[in-house]
Image (cartoon, helix red, strand yellow):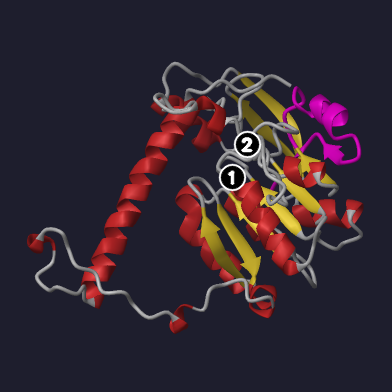
């Protein structure tokens, strides 16, 4: 089994596993996002014809580690990082000096809110008390150690000051429980971002419904996030596969008891999809459990 450092699987020729990228990988061989979202985003923006999309990164946390915008910056894009933890913002000025980094949070209204900190560096720090308490209840080795009052502003307010009222092409939100409230308060003005990456979590249905009403479609879901694309642009650039042109492939179960017919009916296929979704949810829960125990790099 190979580890995160890229070591060869046991029993194989290690020289063949010494992969450092290929010239046919236009976006490189490295991902900085938690679940590879940045490479998905690079593909989307390339198809949309935007090579250096401006961005807003809400809950940016770290300029490189588990960042949805580090690869964008490395490839020439610039944007705004919003991070309420004062211990983390200094790293942005050193690693990404051409970005604007704001030591504040995004919220449902302008003001000051309590910021619940598990520790000085944790990605679990949040303005949402219920989210912080739920995390501590699930992980009793942790506790809310500090509560600081940190300013918050609506996205519309931030965009009005720093972007002339026009949203950039990409918006990433990872606000540990406050994601829906932030989006609900952001009216986007005449034209919102083209692409959004949102930590949807248990608010997946509400967030999807909200964005659907504003003209966005879900492009894909990763373990923790959902990527949305403005529907008009997605259709204009044929971003979505036209499933109506696909001929269903007959499915023959290896065990006849799995399906009474040799070819899966629509009901059988739906049952398979539901089973796959349940398995993905189980995997997501396990991954989230592992990530909760993973150390967060210091700034």
Task: Specify the quadrant that holds the N terminus.
Answer: top left
Q: Is residue 91 magenta?
A: yes
Secondary structure of residue under mark 2:
loop
The quarter of the displayed image where residue 228 is located: bottom right
Report x, y in % for residue 171.
Answer: 71, 54
Magenta-colored span: 83-107
Residue 12 in the figure: left or right of residue 215? left
In this picture, is 242 found above or below 59? below
Task: Specify the quadrant that holds the C terminus.
Answer: top right
Residue depicted at x 31% and y 52%: 278
In this picture, is 71 found above or below 144? below
In this picture, is 118 found above or below 69? above
Mark earlier in primary sequence (1, 2): 1
In this picture, is 239 found above or below 50? below
Report x, y in % for residue 35.
Answer: 55, 42
The residue beneath circle 2 is: 127
Residue 36 bears which disc, if any? Answer: 1
The quarter of the displayed image where residue 63 is located: top right
Residue depicted at x 51% and y 36%: 131
Residue sitting nearer the eye, 162 or 66: 66
Residue 46 in the figure: left or right of residue 37? right
Residue 228 in the figure: left or right of residue 63? left
Report x, y in % for residue 53.
Answer: 80, 57
Q: Assess disc 2: are there few (<14), some (14-19) or many (≥20) residues with their C-alpha within 10 Å of its C-alpha.
A: many
């Amino acid at each position: 089994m190979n580890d995160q450092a890229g070591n060869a699987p046991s029993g194989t020729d290690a020289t063949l596993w010494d992969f450092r990228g290929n010239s046919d990988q236009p976006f490189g061989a490295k991902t900085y996002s938690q679940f590879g979202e940045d490479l998905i985003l690079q593909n989307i923006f390339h198809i949309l014809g935007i090579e250096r999309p401006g961005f807003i990164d809400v809950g940016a946390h770290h300029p490189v580690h588990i960042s949805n915008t580090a690869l964008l910056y490395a490839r020439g894009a610039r944007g705004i990082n919003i991070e309420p933890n004062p211990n983390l913002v200094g790293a942005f000025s050193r690693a990404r000096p051409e970005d604007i980094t704001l030591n504040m949070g995004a919220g449902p209204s302008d003001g000051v809110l309590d910021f619940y900190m598990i520790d000085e560096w944790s990605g679990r720090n949040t303005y949402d008390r219920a989210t912080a308490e739920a995390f501590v209840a699930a992980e009793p080795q942790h506790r809310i150690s500090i509560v600081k009052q940190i300013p918050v502003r609506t996205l519309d307010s931030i965009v009005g000051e720093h972007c002339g009222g026009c949203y950039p092409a990409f918006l990433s939100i990872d606000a540990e429980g406050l994601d829906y409230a932030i989006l609900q308060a952001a009216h986007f003005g005449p034209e919102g971002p083209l692409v959004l990456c949102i930590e949807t979590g248990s608010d997946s249905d509400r967030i999807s419904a909200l964005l659907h009403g504003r003209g966005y479609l879900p492009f894909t879901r990763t373990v923790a996030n959902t990527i949305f694309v403005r529907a008009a642009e997605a259709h204009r650039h044929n971003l979505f596969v036209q499933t109506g042109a696909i001929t269903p492939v007959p499915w023959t179960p290896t065990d006849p008891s799995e399906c009474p017919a040799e070819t899966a009916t629509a009901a059988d296929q739906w049952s398979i999809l539901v089973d796959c979704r349940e398995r993905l949810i189980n995997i997501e829960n396990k991954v989230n459990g592992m990530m909760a125990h993973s150390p967060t790099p210091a700034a």
